[in-house]
Structures are given as structure tokens and as C-alpha cells.
Image: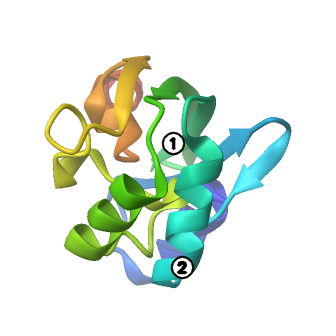
């Protein structure tokens, strides 16, 4: 998906431009997590994630000078155990209806909202969908 996104803009950028694209998917128990789209679906999805670990997988592509550099970045996110009231309070406060998994770190979903127990990976920016350390590495390849 990241490569398709990058290729979709190639005819609209000046020659010599660097194109960056990324996409993220979530996986739990062998199934894809989705953007819930509604309050009730977000609550149900969060309840299914309560007390469990899921993966957030980022595909990142950087195109420059006719070359493509790409990487995959994986995060393991473990959710605290919480009940329907906590899930509903979070969803109604932040409306995370357009995000994989139905939550966002930038919404203070960590300690503040009490949803996340731990994150293993390159950093919070990767959970948000664009791991900066990985992007820096790919950009460095373009400049050499």
C-alpha cells in the first residue's frame, strides 16, 4: 500500500523530488484490525483488544532518482485490561473512528486514558504510523 501511494503521486511532483509514503495495518490473533468508523464499533473493537497484544505494522517507502527504498517497522502494543465503561469514555472523548485499532497515542491513550500497558518497537511515532528513525535511514540511502 505504501508503494502504491508513492507511485500515485509521481506524475505530480517535479523531477528530482523525494517521495515519502507510509501505510499501517494492525493484526491481532491472526485477524486485521480496522478503522471502526462508528462509536459502537470502536468500543467493541477496543473491548476485544482489552488485555491482549496486537501488532502494528508500518510499510514505509522513499523514492528518489528512480530508486525505491523501503522498510517494514513492527510494534507490539499490549493493552491493559479495561471494561466497557472505560472504552466508551475513551471513544466518546476522542472519537478515534478513523484509526487502525480505534485508538491513538496522541489522544493520551497511554497512562492518561489507561488503555495501553506497553509498546515495544522503534517508538511512539511508529505506533502513530510514521517511524521517524526508519524514515531517516531510508532518506539517508537516497542522499548517498
Q: Earlier in the sequence, mark 2 or mark 1?
A: 2
Q: How is the image coloured?
A: rainbow
- The residue furthest right is 30
The C terminus, quarter of image: top left
Q: Secondary structure at mark 1?
A: strand
> Residue at the location (51% across, 42% down)?
60
Percent coordinates x, y for residue 38 in the rendering:
51, 84
CB under 8 Å between discs 2 and 1: no
Percent coordinates x, y for residue 12 in the rendering:
41, 83
Q: Nearer the viewer, residue 113 or 107?
A: 113
Which picture quadrant has residue 135? top left
Percent coordinates x, y for residue 105 in the rendering:
27, 45
Q: Nearer the viewer, residue 97 or 139?
A: 97
Q: Point out which mark residue 40 bears.
A: 2
Q: Pointer 1: residues within 10 angstroms few (<14), some, or many (20+)?
A: many
Q: Nearer the viewer, residue 68 or 59?
A: 59
> Residue at the location (56% across, 37% down)?
56
Q: Is residue 56 left or right of residue 17?
A: right
Foreground tag (2 vs 1) = 2
Q: Point out which mark residue 60 bears.
A: 1
Amino acid at each position: 500500500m505504501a508503494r502504491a501511494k508513492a507511485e500515485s503521486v509521481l506524475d505530480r511532483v517535479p523531477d528530482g523530488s523525494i517521495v515519502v509514503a507510509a501505510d499501517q495495518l494492525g493484526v491481532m490473533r491472526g485477524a486485521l484490525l480496522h478503522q471502526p468508523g462508528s462509536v459502537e464499533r470502536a468500543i467493541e473493537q477496543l473491548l476485544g483488544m482489552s488485555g491482549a497484544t496486537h501488532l502494528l505494522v508500518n510499510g514505509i517507502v522513499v523514492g528518489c532518482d528512480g530508486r525505491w527504498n523501503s522498510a517494514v517497522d513492527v510494534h507490539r502494543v499490549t493493552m491493559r485490561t479495561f471494561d466497557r465503561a472505560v472504552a466508551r469514555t475513551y471513544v466518546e472523548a476522542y472519537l478515534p473512528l478513523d484509526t487502525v485499532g480505534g485508538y491513538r497515542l496522541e489522544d493520551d491513550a497511554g497512562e492518561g486514558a489507561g488503555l495501553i500497558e506497553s509498546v515495544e518497537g522503534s517508538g511512539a511515532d511508529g505506533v502513530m504510523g510514521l517511524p521517524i528513525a526508519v524514515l531517516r535511514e531510508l532518506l539517508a540511502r537516497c542522499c548517498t
